[in-house]
Image (tube, rainbow, N blue to C red):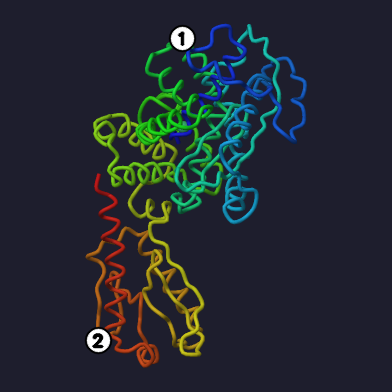
Amino acid sequence: MAISLRIFGVAVLLAGVSSAAAQPPSGAGSRPNPPAGSAPNLPPIPPGVRTTPENAHLPTEGEIKLGREGVLEVEKQYKVLTSGSYHDRLQRVVREVVRAAQSPEIVAEFRRVYQVPRPDDRSKRVPFEYTFKVLDTTREVNAFSLPGGPIYVTRGLMDQAISDHELAGVLAHECVHVAFHHAEQLIKKSRKLNTSQMWALLAAAVAGVAGGGQAAAAAGNILMGAQFVSIATLTGYGQDLETEADKIGALILTRTGFHPLGIYTFMQKLARDERRRGNPDYGIYRSHPYTNQRVTALQREIRRLGYSVDPGVERRVSGAYRLEVTPHQFQGREAAELRLNGNLLLTVVAPDGMLAPADRAQRMAQQIESLFAANITSSDVRQSNEQGAVLIRGIPVIRVLPDDAAVLGSAAAVVDRAYREILRAMLQEQVDRIK
Ligand SMILES: [Zn+2]
């Protein structure tokens, strides 16, 4: 994704470059840089190997140095979570993604697109240094990468990416920025372009990072304002490279157990949440055609890769309907709560033949989940008081047995509640879809 910190990431990079370059950009060169590659607990960068056709996809020593400088900056600003559920989830999901990102097929794609190695390439090549860390903030919904391999996601982003498909999508996108050397390309390009708008943003970002106080607040505003616009527009790595990260990211996901649609549903979700928050940049965001282009391009690419895209698949991939069963003590009995997106549908109290309450609830959850994935609409949902059930396409997915009703109160009231909760969740989905 290309959100606020991406600008920060770029600023760090350019500040790093400027320490080596003869002509630092105005305002961005005054910040003292830590010595290159001096991140704590890191072994020295291994000696580089001359570029050959076999290793031309690997980073240069320079990229690794910039990435390590970036790590120092980022970790001065943010607390990194090194254990706990967020950390564990990230490491679990990323394992498959990073393996796929380094697979021969993806490397071959990089070689094909960028025609490497170039005959005049004298760079020394070193291995990637992929690391994946959680930043302990929920205020920012963000993911970004630094050259050579460091990738960060915020806790806020992980909360938004409900399903692992979506988190994997974000990570695959970021891996492409690293594997396809987007930072290096951006630096090359920006030295040529040198647009006043870009330097103004970067200068403010660097001042904010280095100075604190009012400068930081000013930069903060720019960063927040740019946050979601940047998905679509100028920041991040620019349109072409963001589109490439989406496209290759989807290809990476086809080589994992995750669904490539995860990038797509997550992008839609971010755009929607930002509109709801009433961002002043809403107008720019809406009027900019690039978002639609990007989403459409991604959808086309996923279809081209052989996946069907329909609301049922989107529901499954985005985790739009989360059914959970939790064991529960009800008036001293073993019971189970069945919840939809956190809201109680039913407390299952009675066993059904051989099925304990928790197993009954689990069976209901599976049935409802598979019906949601089969494109049901709200007109497919009915309640039947004669059957004491909620029906979806005529199938009694929730049945209130006499033993349940004896404890919970009237069967009709229990059925009605479950019925309303299902409709409420579907209405929420409708609201979320409004473009
Ligand atoms: Zn990106």
Residue at the image position 49 percent from the left and 12 percent from the top:
25
Q: Name the spot of residue 138 as percent of width and height, x first.
A: 47, 48
Hey, which quadrant is residue 429 in on the image?
bottom left
Element under label 2? loop
Hey, which quadrant is residue 389 in on the image?
bottom left
How packed mark 2 is, by other alpha carbons closer than 10 Å (few <14, some 14-19, many 20 or more), is few
The span from disc 1 to disc 2 (Cα, nearest Å) is 74 Å
Residue at the image position 77 percent from the left and 27 percent from the top:
44
Q: Name the spot of residue 74 as percent of width and height, x first.
A: 58, 34
Residue at the image position 27 percent from the left and 43 percent from the top:
278
Residue at the image position 54 percent from the left and 7 percent from the top:
23
Q: Which mark is residue 204?
A: none
Instruction: Compare marks 1 and 2 and give the one earlier in the sequence.
Output: 1
Look at the image and tell me in which quarter the C terminus lies. top left
Please state if 415 lies on the left or on the right of 191 as rendered.
left
Element under label 1? helix
Instruction: Say which amino acid is labelled 2.
Output: Glu
Question: Which residue is the extreme one toward the left?
Answer: 379
Choose between 181 and 356: the one closer to the eye: 181
Label 1: which residue? 192
The residue mark sitting in front, 1 or 2, is 1
**Marks 1 & 2, CB-CB < 8 Å contact:** no
Label 2: which residue? 386
Relative to 281, does residue 45 appear above or below in the rendering? above
Please state if 420 lies on the left or on the right of 176 as rendered.
left
